[in-house]
Image: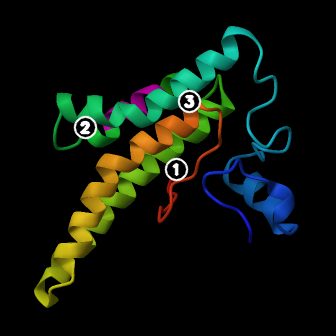
Amino acid sequence: MGHQHNQPYDSSQQGPWAEQFWAGSQGQNPNAQSAAAPSGYGQGDSASNERTFATFCHLGVYLGWSILPVAGFFLGPMIVWLLKKDESAFADHHGREAMNFQISCILWMLISIPLCLIGVGFITFILAALASLLMPIYAALKAADGQWYKYPLTWRFI
């Protein structure tokens, strides 16, 4: 509907269902006050801290992998999210996105395993693995820039 992932989300481009979606899934539309940043954003240290913690939500994937290779993909973002979710709607959004994306990548890889029998699974497995390694960097850059980024092809469980 005209929304591109490299632009701040503009809820005015959506129909009336958009407000219900945000109210049902996160309790508020994070873009109701500003298309690029949360309310009160852009002034002083708190804005910088919010962007920093939101960025760490995405980059925590790499720290988690270095500590616990099998399940660490989820550990880094979860720790940052749990610490900051109640203090910052921006960090809450990015923490949820980071965790949901990593869970989705694991599910895409698991779905790919039986598809290997027909030859397609090898490609989808590699694509999911590469996405889980590369997309957090892009998302971290968006968070550092103060944008409400949403990962593509992601199931939102949290």
Range covered by the magenta-colored residues: 75-80
| Cα–Cα span, label 1 and label 3 | 22 Å
Name the foreground residue: 146 vs 88. 146
Identified at 52% across, 24% down, the residue is 53
Residue that extends furthest to the left in the rendered view of this protein: 117
Q: Amino acid at mark 2?
A: Gly
Is residue 4 depicted above or below 92 in this figure? below
Identified at 36% across, 31% down, the residue is 60
* Residue for badge 3: 144
* Residue for badge 2: 72
| Cα–Cα span, label 2 and label 3 | 22 Å
Label 2 vs 1, first from the N-terminus:
2
* Residue for badge 1: 158
The reply to whether dot 1 and dot 3 touch (C-beta < 8 Å) is no
Q: Amino acid at mark 3?
A: Ala
Residue that extends furthest to the bottom in the rendered view of this protein: 118
| Cα–Cα span, label 2 and label 1 | 17 Å
**Mark 1 or 3, closer to the camera:** 3
Q: Position of residue 66 (x, y in %)?
A: 19, 30
Mark 2 lies on a secondary structure that is helix
Whether residue 67 is in magenta: the answer is no
Label 1 vs 3, first from the N-terminus:
3
The reply to whether dot 2 and dot 1 touch (C-beta < 8 Å) is no
Q: Position of residue 101 (x, y in %)?
A: 43, 53
